Image (cartoon, rainbow, N blue to C red):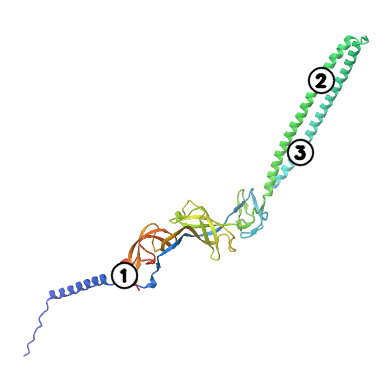
Protein backbone atom coordinates (compact mmCIF):
# COMPACT_ATOMS: atom_id res chain seq x y z
CA UNK A 1 0.00 0.00 0.00
CA UNK A 2 1.07 3.54 -0.69
CA UNK A 3 2.10 5.73 2.20
CA UNK A 4 1.16 9.44 1.93
CA UNK A 5 3.97 11.70 3.04
CA UNK A 6 3.01 15.11 4.53
CA UNK A 7 5.06 18.23 3.65
CA UNK A 8 6.49 20.02 6.59
CA UNK A 9 4.61 23.35 7.39
CA UNK A 10 6.55 26.60 7.01
CA UNK A 11 6.67 28.91 9.98
CA UNK A 12 4.28 31.87 9.67
CA UNK A 13 6.55 33.92 11.89
CA UNK A 14 9.56 33.64 9.56
CA UNK A 15 7.44 34.63 6.50
CA UNK A 16 6.25 37.84 8.14
CA UNK A 17 9.80 38.82 9.02
CA UNK A 18 10.90 38.29 5.44
CA UNK A 19 8.15 40.63 4.14
CA UNK A 20 9.00 43.27 6.74
CA UNK A 21 12.67 43.16 5.89
CA UNK A 22 11.85 43.59 2.20
CA UNK A 23 9.71 46.67 2.88
CA UNK A 24 12.37 48.23 5.12
CA UNK A 25 15.00 47.60 2.49
CA UNK A 26 12.86 49.27 -0.17
CA UNK A 27 12.28 52.39 2.00
CA UNK A 28 15.98 52.65 2.85
CA UNK A 29 16.89 52.31 -0.82
CA UNK A 30 14.33 55.00 -1.85
CA UNK A 31 15.62 57.45 0.77
CA UNK A 32 19.19 56.78 -0.22
CA UNK A 33 18.35 57.23 -3.92
CA UNK A 34 16.48 60.48 -3.28
CA UNK A 35 19.38 61.94 -1.31
CA UNK A 36 22.00 61.03 -3.85
CA UNK A 37 20.19 61.41 -7.19
CA UNK A 38 20.10 64.59 -9.31
CA UNK A 39 16.65 65.87 -10.35
CA UNK A 40 16.53 67.90 -13.53
CA UNK A 41 14.06 70.29 -15.21
CA UNK A 42 13.65 71.13 -18.87
CA UNK A 43 15.40 74.35 -19.89
CA UNK A 44 12.39 75.46 -21.90
CA UNK A 45 10.26 75.44 -18.73
CA UNK A 46 12.34 78.09 -16.90
CA UNK A 47 13.41 81.68 -17.58
CA UNK A 48 16.97 82.74 -16.96
CA UNK A 49 18.92 85.98 -17.21
CA UNK A 50 22.50 87.10 -16.98
CA UNK A 51 23.60 89.62 -14.36
CA UNK A 52 24.86 92.81 -16.06
CA UNK A 53 26.68 95.95 -14.97
CA UNK A 54 25.91 99.33 -16.51
CA UNK A 55 23.36 102.10 -16.59
CA UNK A 56 19.91 101.06 -15.35
CA UNK A 57 16.77 103.07 -15.94
CA UNK A 58 14.22 102.40 -13.24
CA UNK A 59 10.65 102.57 -14.52
CA UNK A 60 7.26 102.31 -12.92
CA UNK A 61 4.46 101.15 -15.18
CA UNK A 62 0.74 101.63 -15.07
CA UNK A 63 -2.36 101.61 -17.26
CA UNK A 64 -4.60 104.61 -17.72
CA UNK A 65 -6.68 106.67 -20.12
CA UNK A 66 -6.53 110.02 -21.87
CA UNK A 67 -8.93 112.60 -20.47
CA UNK A 68 -9.62 116.14 -21.68
CA UNK A 69 -7.72 118.84 -19.83
CA UNK A 70 -10.79 121.08 -19.85
CA UNK A 71 -14.30 119.74 -19.23
CA UNK A 72 -17.43 121.89 -18.96
CA UNK A 73 -20.84 120.90 -17.68
CA UNK A 74 -23.51 123.09 -19.26
CA UNK A 75 -26.40 123.54 -16.82
CA UNK A 76 -29.74 125.29 -17.18
CA UNK A 77 -30.32 128.48 -15.19
CA UNK A 78 -34.13 128.30 -15.30
CA UNK A 79 -36.95 125.81 -15.15
CA UNK A 80 -38.35 124.70 -18.46
CA UNK A 81 -39.46 121.96 -20.81
CA UNK A 82 -37.22 120.56 -23.55
CA UNK A 83 -38.72 121.86 -26.77
CA UNK A 84 -36.00 121.10 -29.32
CA UNK A 85 -32.69 119.18 -29.32
CA UNK A 86 -30.06 120.13 -31.89
CA UNK A 87 -27.16 117.79 -31.08
CA UNK A 88 -26.45 114.42 -29.47
CA UNK A 89 -23.54 112.89 -27.61
CA UNK A 90 -20.47 112.52 -29.81
CA UNK A 91 -21.15 115.63 -31.90
CA UNK A 92 -18.50 118.31 -32.39
CA UNK A 93 -19.62 121.84 -31.55
CA UNK A 94 -18.19 125.34 -31.71
CA UNK A 95 -18.58 127.96 -29.03
CA UNK A 96 -22.05 129.48 -29.35
CA UNK A 97 -23.58 126.58 -31.28
CA UNK A 98 -27.14 125.74 -30.08
CA UNK A 99 -27.52 122.56 -28.06
CA UNK A 100 -31.21 122.64 -27.20
CA UNK A 101 -34.15 125.00 -26.62
CA UNK A 102 -36.36 125.15 -23.52
CA UNK A 103 -39.81 126.69 -23.21
CA UNK A 104 -41.20 128.59 -20.21
CA UNK A 105 -44.29 130.76 -21.03
CA UNK A 106 -44.54 132.14 -17.48
CA UNK A 107 -41.02 133.48 -17.66
CA UNK A 108 -41.68 135.16 -21.01
CA UNK A 109 -44.83 136.79 -19.62
CA UNK A 110 -42.92 138.03 -16.55
CA UNK A 111 -40.38 139.65 -18.86
CA UNK A 112 -43.10 141.48 -20.81
CA UNK A 113 -44.71 142.78 -17.59
CA UNK A 114 -41.40 144.09 -16.28
CA UNK A 115 -40.65 145.74 -19.61
CA UNK A 116 -44.03 147.54 -19.50
CA UNK A 117 -43.38 148.64 -15.91
CA UNK A 118 -39.99 149.96 -16.90
CA UNK A 119 -41.43 152.00 -19.74
CA UNK A 120 -44.12 153.43 -17.43
CA UNK A 121 -41.56 154.34 -14.79
CA UNK A 122 -39.29 155.98 -17.33
CA UNK A 123 -42.20 158.15 -18.56
CA UNK A 124 -43.23 159.07 -15.03
CA UNK A 125 -39.71 159.96 -13.94
CA UNK A 126 -39.19 161.97 -17.10
CA UNK A 127 -42.33 164.01 -16.29
CA UNK A 128 -41.16 164.59 -12.73
CA UNK A 129 -37.76 165.68 -14.00
CA UNK A 130 -39.35 168.20 -16.34
CA UNK A 131 -41.47 169.57 -13.45
CA UNK A 132 -38.42 169.95 -11.25
CA UNK A 133 -36.46 171.68 -13.99
CA UNK A 134 -39.41 174.08 -14.52
CA UNK A 135 -39.45 174.83 -10.80
CA UNK A 136 -35.76 175.63 -10.92
CA UNK A 137 -36.40 178.00 -13.83
CA UNK A 138 -39.18 179.73 -11.86
CA UNK A 139 -36.82 180.15 -8.95
CA UNK A 140 -34.17 181.53 -11.25
CA UNK A 141 -36.72 184.09 -12.54
CA UNK A 142 -37.48 185.21 -8.98
CA UNK A 143 -33.77 185.52 -8.35
CA UNK A 144 -33.28 187.73 -11.40
CA UNK A 145 -36.26 189.94 -10.48
CA UNK A 146 -34.98 190.34 -6.94
CA UNK A 147 -31.60 191.33 -8.26
CA UNK A 148 -33.10 193.90 -10.64
CA UNK A 149 -35.31 195.39 -7.92
CA UNK A 150 -32.32 195.69 -5.63
CA UNK A 151 -30.19 197.34 -8.28
CA UNK A 152 -33.02 199.79 -9.16
CA UNK A 153 -33.50 200.78 -5.53
CA UNK A 154 -29.75 201.10 -5.08
CA UNK A 155 -29.56 203.39 -8.08
CA UNK A 156 -32.30 205.64 -6.59
CA UNK A 157 -30.49 205.72 -3.24
CA UNK A 158 -27.23 206.71 -4.88
CA UNK A 159 -28.87 209.53 -6.84
CA UNK A 160 -30.60 210.92 -3.73
CA UNK A 161 -27.37 210.83 -1.78
CA UNK A 162 -25.60 212.76 -4.53
CA UNK A 163 -28.27 215.47 -4.55
CA UNK A 164 -28.28 215.78 -0.77
CA UNK A 165 -24.49 216.06 -0.74
CA UNK A 166 -24.80 218.94 -3.22
CA UNK A 167 -27.33 220.72 -0.96
CA UNK A 168 -30.36 220.25 -3.15
CA UNK A 169 -33.43 220.37 -0.91
CA UNK A 170 -35.80 218.77 -3.43
CA UNK A 171 -35.25 215.39 -1.70
CA UNK A 172 -36.33 215.12 1.86
CA UNK A 173 -34.31 213.24 4.39
CA UNK A 174 -37.31 211.06 5.25
CA UNK A 175 -37.68 209.87 1.68
CA UNK A 176 -33.95 209.20 1.57
CA UNK A 177 -34.10 207.04 4.70
CA UNK A 178 -37.09 205.11 3.32
CA UNK A 179 -35.11 204.33 0.19
CA UNK A 180 -32.22 203.09 2.36
CA UNK A 181 -34.56 200.71 4.16
CA UNK A 182 -35.99 199.51 0.85
CA UNK A 183 -32.52 198.84 -0.54
CA UNK A 184 -31.65 196.69 2.50
CA UNK A 185 -34.89 194.71 2.16
CA UNK A 186 -34.35 194.10 -1.54
CA UNK A 187 -30.76 193.01 -0.88
CA UNK A 188 -31.90 190.47 1.70
CA UNK A 189 -34.65 189.24 -0.65
CA UNK A 190 -32.10 188.85 -3.46
CA UNK A 191 -29.75 186.89 -1.20
CA UNK A 192 -32.64 184.71 -0.01
CA UNK A 193 -33.81 183.99 -3.55
CA UNK A 194 -30.24 183.14 -4.48
CA UNK A 195 -30.14 180.56 -1.69
CA UNK A 196 -33.50 179.16 -2.79
CA UNK A 197 -32.19 178.88 -6.34
CA UNK A 198 -29.14 176.90 -5.15
CA UNK A 199 -31.36 174.58 -3.11
CA UNK A 200 -33.63 174.09 -6.11
CA UNK A 201 -30.67 173.09 -8.24
CA UNK A 202 -29.41 170.70 -5.53
CA UNK A 203 -32.89 169.20 -5.22
CA UNK A 204 -33.02 168.69 -8.98
CA UNK A 205 -29.62 166.97 -8.97
CA UNK A 206 -30.61 164.75 -6.01
CA UNK A 207 -33.91 163.80 -7.61
CA UNK A 208 -32.15 162.95 -10.86
CA UNK A 209 -29.75 160.65 -8.95
CA UNK A 210 -32.72 158.98 -7.26
CA UNK A 211 -34.50 158.61 -10.57
CA UNK A 212 -31.34 157.19 -12.16
CA UNK A 213 -30.90 154.66 -9.32
CA UNK A 214 -34.51 153.60 -9.56
CA UNK A 215 -34.30 153.17 -13.31
CA UNK A 216 -31.02 151.31 -13.02
CA UNK A 217 -32.56 148.89 -10.51
CA UNK A 218 -35.55 148.28 -12.75
CA UNK A 219 -33.36 147.90 -15.84
CA UNK A 220 -31.20 145.36 -14.03
CA UNK A 221 -34.33 143.48 -13.04
CA UNK A 222 -35.49 143.45 -16.64
CA UNK A 223 -32.00 142.49 -17.84
CA UNK A 224 -31.92 139.60 -15.35
CA UNK A 225 -35.25 138.28 -16.56
CA UNK A 226 -34.15 138.85 -20.15
CA UNK A 227 -31.04 136.79 -19.42
CA UNK A 228 -33.23 134.03 -18.02
CA UNK A 229 -35.36 134.09 -21.15
CA UNK A 230 -32.19 134.01 -23.28
CA UNK A 231 -31.04 131.04 -21.15
CA UNK A 232 -33.89 129.02 -22.59
CA UNK A 233 -31.61 128.73 -25.64
CA UNK A 234 -28.72 126.50 -24.44
CA UNK A 235 -25.46 126.96 -26.39
CA UNK A 236 -21.98 125.47 -26.27
CA UNK A 237 -19.51 127.34 -24.06
CA UNK A 238 -16.31 126.06 -25.72
CA UNK A 239 -15.13 124.39 -28.91
CA UNK A 240 -15.53 120.78 -27.89
CA UNK A 241 -17.00 117.31 -28.26
CA UNK A 242 -20.33 116.58 -26.57
CA UNK A 243 -19.54 113.66 -24.26
CA UNK A 244 -22.98 113.40 -22.68
CA UNK A 245 -26.44 114.83 -23.39
CA UNK A 246 -29.02 112.78 -21.46
CA UNK A 247 -32.21 114.82 -22.07
CA UNK A 248 -35.23 113.93 -24.19
CA UNK A 249 -37.91 115.98 -25.94
CA UNK A 250 -40.74 117.06 -23.64
CA UNK A 251 -38.72 116.43 -20.50
CA UNK A 252 -39.20 118.97 -17.72
CA UNK A 253 -36.05 120.13 -15.97
CA UNK A 254 -35.34 122.41 -13.05
CA UNK A 255 -32.77 125.12 -12.48
CA UNK A 256 -29.26 123.70 -12.14
CA UNK A 257 -29.91 120.52 -14.13
CA UNK A 258 -26.88 119.41 -16.16
CA UNK A 259 -27.64 119.65 -19.87
CA UNK A 260 -24.46 118.49 -21.59
CA UNK A 261 -20.88 117.54 -20.80
CA UNK A 262 -18.42 119.26 -23.13
CA UNK A 263 -14.77 118.28 -23.44
CA UNK A 264 -12.04 119.94 -25.46
CA UNK A 265 -10.66 117.60 -28.09
CA UNK A 266 -7.31 119.32 -28.59
CA UNK A 267 -5.86 119.21 -25.07
CA UNK A 268 -5.49 116.00 -23.05
CA UNK A 269 -3.80 114.68 -19.97
CA UNK A 270 -3.28 111.03 -19.02
CA UNK A 271 -4.59 109.52 -15.80
CA UNK A 272 -2.33 106.56 -14.95
CA UNK A 273 -3.03 104.03 -12.17
CA UNK A 274 0.16 103.02 -10.34
CA UNK A 275 0.31 100.15 -7.78
CA UNK A 276 0.44 101.61 -4.29
CA UNK A 277 3.58 99.60 -3.45
CA UNK A 278 5.50 101.44 -6.17
CA UNK A 279 4.08 104.93 -5.80
CA UNK A 280 6.81 105.92 -3.32
CA UNK A 281 9.22 106.12 -6.26
CA UNK A 282 7.07 108.56 -8.25
CA UNK A 283 7.60 112.32 -7.90
CA UNK A 284 6.41 115.47 -9.63
CA UNK A 285 8.07 116.53 -12.93
CA UNK A 286 9.41 113.00 -13.61
CA UNK A 287 9.43 112.16 -17.31
CA UNK A 288 6.88 109.70 -18.67
CA UNK A 289 6.46 107.74 -21.89
CA UNK A 290 2.86 107.17 -22.95
CA UNK A 291 2.19 104.28 -25.32
CA UNK A 292 -1.09 104.38 -27.27
CA UNK A 293 -0.28 101.08 -29.01
CA UNK A 294 0.11 103.11 -32.20
CA UNK A 295 2.45 105.92 -31.17
CA UNK A 296 4.51 106.95 -28.20
CA UNK A 297 4.47 110.45 -26.75
CA UNK A 298 6.45 112.07 -23.96
CA UNK A 299 4.97 113.63 -20.84
CA UNK A 300 5.71 114.60 -17.25
CA UNK A 301 4.07 113.98 -13.88
CA UNK A 302 1.97 116.98 -12.79
CA UNK A 303 -0.12 115.50 -9.94
CA UNK A 304 -0.13 112.52 -7.58
CA UNK A 305 -3.45 111.71 -5.98
CA UNK A 306 -3.13 111.37 -2.18
CA UNK A 307 -5.80 108.65 -2.02
CA UNK A 308 -5.43 104.91 -2.67
CA UNK A 309 -8.30 103.33 -4.61
CA UNK A 310 -8.44 99.55 -5.15
CA UNK A 311 -4.73 99.23 -4.44
CA UNK A 312 -3.64 101.89 -6.94
CA UNK A 313 -2.86 105.61 -6.92
CA UNK A 314 -3.80 107.95 -9.76
CA UNK A 315 -0.99 109.93 -11.36
CA UNK A 316 -1.81 112.76 -13.78
CA UNK A 317 0.58 113.18 -16.70
CA UNK A 318 0.85 116.30 -18.86
CA UNK A 319 1.48 115.51 -22.52
CA UNK A 320 4.51 117.29 -24.02
CA UNK A 321 4.63 117.92 -27.72
CA UNK A 322 2.17 117.14 -30.48
CA UNK A 323 -0.78 114.90 -29.73
CA UNK A 324 -0.97 111.63 -31.66
CA UNK A 325 -3.67 111.45 -34.31
CA UNK A 326 -5.54 108.70 -32.48
CA UNK A 327 -5.89 110.77 -29.30
CA UNK A 328 -9.46 110.86 -28.04
CA UNK A 329 -11.21 110.84 -24.63
CA UNK A 330 -10.97 107.55 -22.72
CA UNK A 331 -8.26 106.15 -25.03
CA UNK A 332 -6.36 103.46 -23.10
CA UNK A 333 -2.62 104.11 -22.75
CA UNK A 334 0.33 102.47 -21.03
CA UNK A 335 2.32 104.83 -18.84
CA UNK A 336 6.02 104.28 -18.19
CA UNK A 337 7.31 106.66 -15.52
CA UNK A 338 11.11 107.01 -15.50
CA UNK A 339 11.75 107.31 -11.77
CA UNK A 340 15.57 107.07 -11.65
CA UNK A 341 18.73 106.54 -13.68
CA UNK A 342 21.40 104.39 -11.98
CA UNK A 343 24.96 104.46 -13.32
CA UNK A 344 27.43 101.56 -13.04
CA UNK A 345 24.80 99.40 -11.37
CA UNK A 346 24.69 95.61 -11.08
CA UNK A 347 21.26 94.40 -12.19
CA UNK A 348 19.24 91.51 -13.55
CA UNK A 349 15.72 90.83 -14.70
CA UNK A 350 13.57 90.82 -11.60
CA UNK A 351 13.11 87.23 -10.33
CA UNK A 352 9.64 86.12 -9.42
CA UNK A 353 8.63 87.38 -5.95
CA UNK A 354 11.79 89.50 -5.60
CA UNK A 355 11.17 92.71 -3.62
CA UNK A 356 13.13 95.94 -3.70
CA UNK A 357 15.49 96.71 -0.80
CA UNK A 358 15.19 93.22 0.67
CA UNK A 359 17.03 89.89 0.83
CA UNK A 360 15.99 86.88 -1.21
CA UNK A 361 17.18 83.61 -2.69
CA UNK A 362 17.86 82.81 -6.36
CA UNK A 363 19.18 79.75 -8.14
CA UNK A 364 22.66 80.38 -9.56
CA UNK A 365 23.46 78.39 -12.72
CA UNK A 366 27.04 77.04 -13.04
CA UNK A 367 28.91 76.03 -16.20
CA UNK A 368 27.52 72.48 -16.03
CA UNK A 369 23.94 73.82 -15.83
CA UNK A 370 23.75 72.88 -12.19
CA UNK A 371 21.76 75.19 -9.95
CA UNK A 372 22.61 76.30 -6.44
CA UNK A 373 20.43 78.42 -4.11
CA UNK A 374 22.18 81.71 -3.41
CA UNK A 375 21.28 84.51 -1.00
CA UNK A 376 21.05 87.91 -2.71
CA UNK A 377 20.61 91.43 -1.35
CA UNK A 378 18.38 93.53 -3.64
CA UNK A 379 18.40 97.28 -4.15
CA UNK A 380 15.96 99.44 -6.10
CA UNK A 381 13.72 97.88 -8.71
CA UNK A 382 11.62 98.72 -11.74
CA UNK A 383 8.80 96.77 -13.32
CA UNK A 384 11.24 94.49 -15.18
CA UNK A 385 14.70 94.79 -13.53
CA UNK A 386 16.14 94.91 -10.03
CA UNK A 387 19.44 96.17 -8.67
CA UNK A 388 21.84 93.65 -7.05
CA UNK A 389 23.62 94.96 -3.96
CA UNK A 390 25.36 91.76 -2.88
CA UNK A 391 25.45 88.03 -3.64
CA UNK A 392 25.98 87.99 -7.43
CA UNK A 393 28.57 89.20 -9.92
CA UNK A 394 28.40 90.45 -13.49
CA UNK A 395 28.12 87.52 -15.89
CA UNK A 396 26.33 85.19 -13.44
CA UNK A 397 23.29 83.39 -14.83
CA UNK A 398 20.29 82.98 -12.56
CA UNK A 399 16.79 81.56 -12.78
CA UNK A 400 14.22 84.38 -12.76
CA UNK A 401 11.00 82.37 -13.20
CA UNK A 402 8.87 80.88 -10.41
CA UNK A 403 10.87 78.30 -8.44
CA UNK A 404 8.57 77.91 -5.46
CA UNK A 405 8.07 74.17 -6.21
CA UNK A 406 11.77 73.34 -6.57
CA UNK A 407 12.37 72.86 -2.87
CA UNK A 408 10.01 69.90 -2.75
CA UNK A 409 11.59 68.27 -5.84
CA UNK A 410 15.17 69.20 -4.90
CA UNK A 411 16.10 70.38 -8.40
CA UNK A 412 19.83 70.10 -9.00
CA UNK A 413 20.29 70.90 -12.69
CA UNK A 414 18.72 72.25 -15.88
CA UNK A 415 18.88 70.19 -19.04
Left-right relation of 328 to 34: right
x and y percentages locating residue 102 in the rendered image: 66, 52
Q: Residue at x 31, y 72 (%)?
A: 39
Helix, strand or loop status at disc 2: helix
- Please rate how many residues cluster around mark 3, counting C-alpha atoms within 10 Å: few if below 14, some from 14 to 19, many from 20: some
Task: Tell me: residue 327, above or below residue 1.
Answer: above
Residue 87 image-quadrant placement: bottom right
Marks 2 & 1, CB-CB < 8 Å contact: no
Mark 2 or mark 1: which is in front? 1
Q: Note whether 350 is above or below 106 in the view shown.
A: below
Q: Earlier in the sequence, mark 1 or mark 3?
A: 3
Badge 1 element: strand
User: What residue appears at the point 90 percent right and 15 percent down from the top-left corner?
Assistant: 159
- Judge by depth and name the residue closer to the eye, 259 or 243: 243
Mark 1 or mark 3, whichever is nearer to me: 1
State the image quarter where residue 94 is shown.
Answer: bottom right
Amino acid sequence: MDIVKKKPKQSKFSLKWLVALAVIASVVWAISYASTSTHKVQAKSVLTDQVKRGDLTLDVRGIGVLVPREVHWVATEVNGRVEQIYIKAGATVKKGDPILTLSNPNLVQTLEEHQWELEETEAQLNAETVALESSVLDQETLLINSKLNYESALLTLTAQKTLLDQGVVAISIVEHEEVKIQVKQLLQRWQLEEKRFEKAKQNLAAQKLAFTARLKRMKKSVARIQHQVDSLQITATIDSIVQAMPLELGQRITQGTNIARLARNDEFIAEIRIPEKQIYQVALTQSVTLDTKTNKVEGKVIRIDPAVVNGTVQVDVDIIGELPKEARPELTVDGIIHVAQLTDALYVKRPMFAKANSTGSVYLIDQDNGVTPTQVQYGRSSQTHIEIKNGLSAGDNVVVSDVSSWKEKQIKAIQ
